[in-house]
Image (spheres, grey):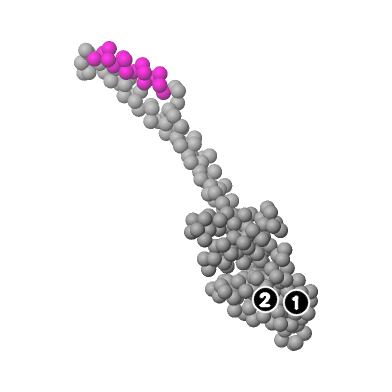
Amino acid sequence: MQGALTLNGRLGPCLPAQRPRLSTAVPYAFKAAAVPVAQSPVLLTECASTVAEVPQELFSLGEGLETPIQLIYLVTLLGFLAVGAYLVVRQVLIRRELDEGAKGLGERIRTGEATCEDYYELGVILTRKKLFTQATKNLEKAKKVWDGEESELAQVHNALGFCYFNMDKTEMAIQEYRRAVELQPGYVTAWNNLGDALEKKGKWRDALVAYQEALTYAPDNRIARQRSDYCKEKVTRLAL
């Protein structure tokens, strides 16, 4: 998911007022080099006070910069906390919605009133919760009792393929994805998923074909474009 934020605080150069004081003190010291230090208490006192004033002015400058930098850090920290809190609350709400949906669909299945769409929706909910084993059972049931449009059955096959892919059953995933694009040739998501599964099996040329099919229906599809270019390099490099 793209760049990290950085904050850099640097202490600025010495104040312009400091340089004339140092530049006048140095030549004055050289002119008075012939005079013993013990006989020049005024010179010693003036040089000591000049040197002592420099770090004090720098310290004042640092104090002036400290508050703005702290405010920047504080605002940045609050921003991160706000984003984190939003994401946590959003995940909690989504999980609650999924749990309520699964509960209602599960009750309809237990009473024998479930339709093929109910099995499919429950399978999708369980997939989003990453309960792939339970999801495949409901999706397989949806596939067996499907009585809707055959082209819409492609979504069931695609969802099954996704579950099998995440269960490391890649060959079964490929079969489901192929069935999905047979039923609905313009199903770009299924073509991309098929290409991904074929890549996992090292079938670079077949994966390239799948991504190119996706691009025929959606030329601006970013995933298909990127993976297609990658597979082309693989095919060329391995002389497949």
Percent position (x, y) of residue 151? Answer: 76, 71
Instruction: Name the residue nearer the viewer: 114 or 104.
Output: 114
> Does 54 sit left or right of 193 as displayed?
left
* Residue 191, placed above or below residue 100: above
The kind of residue tagged 1 is: Glu
Q: Which residue is rendered at x = 75% and y = 87% of the image?
A: 112
The type of residue carrying mark 2 is Gly
Element type at mark 2: helix
**In the image, which residues are magenta?**
18-33
Rendered image: mark on residue 123: 2
Considering only vertical position in the picture, is 59 above or below 179?
Answer: above
Q: At 57% from the left edge and 74% from the top edge, which residue is drawn?
A: 171
- Where does residue 30 sit, x and y in percent of width and height? 27, 15
* Residue 149: percent from left, percent from top: 79, 74
At horizontal 69% and vertical 82% (from top left) the residue drawn is: 141
Residue identifier under label 1: 117
